[in-house]
């Protein structure tokens, strides 16, 4: 009984190394349980890292009245002064496959 418990604990501990990889925790756990933790560790090491892309959105901001617009404008629609363009990061998107 103690050997089975130790086997499962080792399998779960090795499965934690799958975070940030293209193999899921559950998939790594199943490999560790059914094909031995050594095979699971090799499959986790060989798995590639997740691809993370950044999605940006452009906005215009008036330099004098600080009005934000979603469109890219050269001049502020409210006061008529110059508007500067800046980027705002919206979110990170994880892609499992390229």
Image (cartoon, helix red, strand yellow):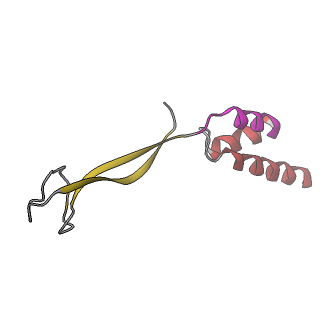
Location of residue 64 (image quadrant)? bottom left
Farthest residue, direction bottom: 65
Write the residue at 75% across / 37% down.
40
Q: Does the magenta stretch include residue 85?
A: no
Write the residue at 37% across / 54% down.
90
For the image shown, how many numbered marks are present on the structure?
0
36 relative to 19 in the view: left or right: right
Q: Which of 26 and 69 is in front in this view?
A: 69
Q: Which of 98 and 63 is in front in this view?
A: 63
x, y (%) of residue 42?
76, 34
x, y (%) of residue 14?
76, 46
Which quarter shows the N terminus?
A: bottom right
Q: Residue 46, relative to residue 9: is it above or below?
A: above
Q: Residue 64, relative to residue 9: is it above or below?
A: below
x, y (%) of residue 98?
48, 30
Secondary structure mainly formed by the magenta segment: helix
- Boundaries of the magenta span: 37-49
Q: Residue 33, relative to residue 42: is it above or below?
A: below
85 relative to 15 in the view: left or right: left
Q: Nearer the viewer, residue 51 or 86?
A: 86
32 relative to 85 in the view: left or right: right
């Amino acid at each position: 009984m103690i050997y089975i418990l130790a086997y499962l604990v080792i399998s779960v501990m090795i499965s934690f190394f799958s975070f940030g990889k293209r193999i899921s925790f559950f998939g790594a756990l199943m490999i560790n349980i059914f094909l031995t933790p050594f095979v699971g560790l090799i499959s986790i090491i060989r798995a590639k890292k997740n691809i993370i892309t950044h999605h940006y959105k452009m906005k215009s901001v008036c330099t004098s009245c600080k009005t934000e617009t979603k469109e890219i404008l050269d001049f502020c629609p409210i006061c008529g002064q110059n508007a500067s363009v800046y980027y705002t990061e919206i979110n990170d998107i994880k892609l499992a496959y390229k």
